[in-house]
Amino acid sequence: MRTTETMTISLPPGMARQLEKVRKQEHRTRSELTREALRRYFDSRVPEVTPTQAEMAAIRRGRAAFKRGEYISLEQLRKELVLANRGPRAKGSRKVSH
């Protein structure tokens, strides 16, 4: 079973020359350089985040609460947020048009 997949890519001539120059200087293959470039690109776009111990504890509590049926629907949450945002108005806070 193969542990890699072969791909063909197209590069502008200047980039291909630069790749060859670096490859020779560092005594590496094109594949090695390309894999490294892709790893760095992926890491910069989608950084891997390791949760803290406190975050993991909160996640476990949330999962346990969910299993116990302690949750509300998205629609119920939306209604509660609308009601909470309405709150009581202070006297004189209404705009008056003249």
Image (cartoon, rainbow, N blue to C red):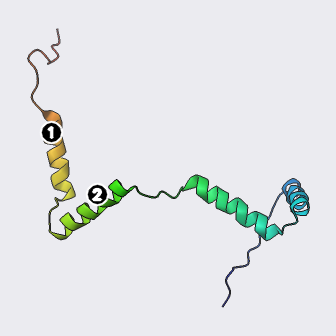
Q: Locate residue 6, reporting x and y percent.
A: 73, 78
Residue 69 left/right relative to 59: left
Q: Which residue is mark 1?
A: 84
Callout 1 amino acid:
Ala
Residue 83 left/right relative to 5: left
Q: Quadrant of the N terminus?
A: bottom right
Task: Please say if 48 is above or below 87.
Answer: below
Residue at image x 73%, y 74%? Answer: 7
Q: Which residue is mark 2?
A: 58
Secondary element at image label 2: helix
Q: Locate residue 58, reporting x and y percent.
A: 28, 57
* Front-most of residues 86 and 24: 24
Q: Of discs 2 and 1, which sits in the foreground?
A: 2
Q: Locate residue 64, reporting x and y percent.
A: 21, 67
Residue at image x 14%, y 18%? Answer: 93
Callout 2 amino acid:
Ala
Residue at image x 17%, y 41%? Answer: 82
Residue farthest to the bottom, as pictured: 1
Secondary element at image label 1: helix
Residue 6 left/right relative to 96: right
How many residues crowd mark 2 within 10 Å: few (<14), some (14–19), many (20+)?
few
Q: How many marks?
A: 2
Residue at image x 33%, y 54%? Answer: 54
Q: Quadrant of the C terminus?
A: top left
Residue 4 left/right relative to 16: left
**On the image, which quarter does residue 8 sit in?**
bottom right
How many residues crowd mark 1 within 10 Å: few (<14), some (14–19), many (20+)?
few
Q: Locate residue 28, reporting x and y percent.
A: 84, 67
Alpha carbons under labels 2 and 1: distance apart: 24 Å
**On the image, which quarter does residue 43 sit in?**
bottom right
Earlier sequence position, callout 2 versus callout 1: 2
